[in-house]
Amino acid sequence: MEKVVKDIEKGQDLIRIELSEFRGKQYVGARIYYMNDKGDWKPTRKGFTLVPEKMEEVRDAINEALQELDGQVTSD
């Protein structure tokens, strides 16, 4: 099973969130893709693939970081 969950534009590249399966285990991945000369999206080495439980930890850490940013007061 391989399924693209979401493509997020990042300049000329994109971040692809996808579900995959390898040797009977399910994984969640986030990888940066670039467009080649033929107009096809190709994966780079930049990214990671984790079991769902570890990806939940990453999600929680990102949410915590965003909450900290929301709590900051900027003085411009």
Image: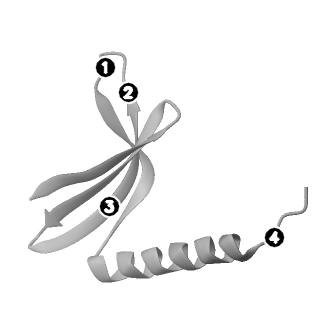
Question: Which x, y percent locates residue 36?
Answer: 36, 23
- Side of 76 relative to 71 (left or right): right
Tell me which residue sits at (11%, 70%) in the image: 23
Of tags 1 and 4, which is closer to the observer?
4
- Provide the secondary structure element on which disc 3 rests: strand
Above or below, 54 relative to 28: below
Name the residue type under label 2. Answer: Met
Q: Are marks 3 and 1 in contact (CB under 8 Å)?
A: no
Element marked by disc 4: loop
Q: Which residue is label 1 attached to?
A: 39
Marks 2 and 1: in contact by CB < 8 Å?
A: yes
Q: Name the residue under label 4.
A: 73
Q: Where is residue 71 in the image (x, y as percent from the top left)?
A: 71, 76
Q: Answer yes or no: do the residues labelled 3 and 2 have beta carbons within 8 Å? A: no
Which of pointers 4 and 3 lies earlier in the amino acid sequence?
3
Which residue is tagged 3?
29
Amino acid on which the number 3 mark rests in the picture:
Gly
Q: Is mark 2 on a helix, strand or loop?
A: strand
Q: How far apart are the two marked residues, 4 and 3, measured between alpha carbons?
A: 33 Å
Give the mark nearest the N terminus, 2 or 4: 2
Q: Could you tell me how far apart the alpha carbons at marks 3 and 2 are, in whole angstroms?
A: 19 Å
* Residue under label 2: 35
Q: On screen, 37 above or below 67?
A: above
Mark 3 neighbour density, 10 Å: few (under 14) some (14–19) many (20 or more) = some
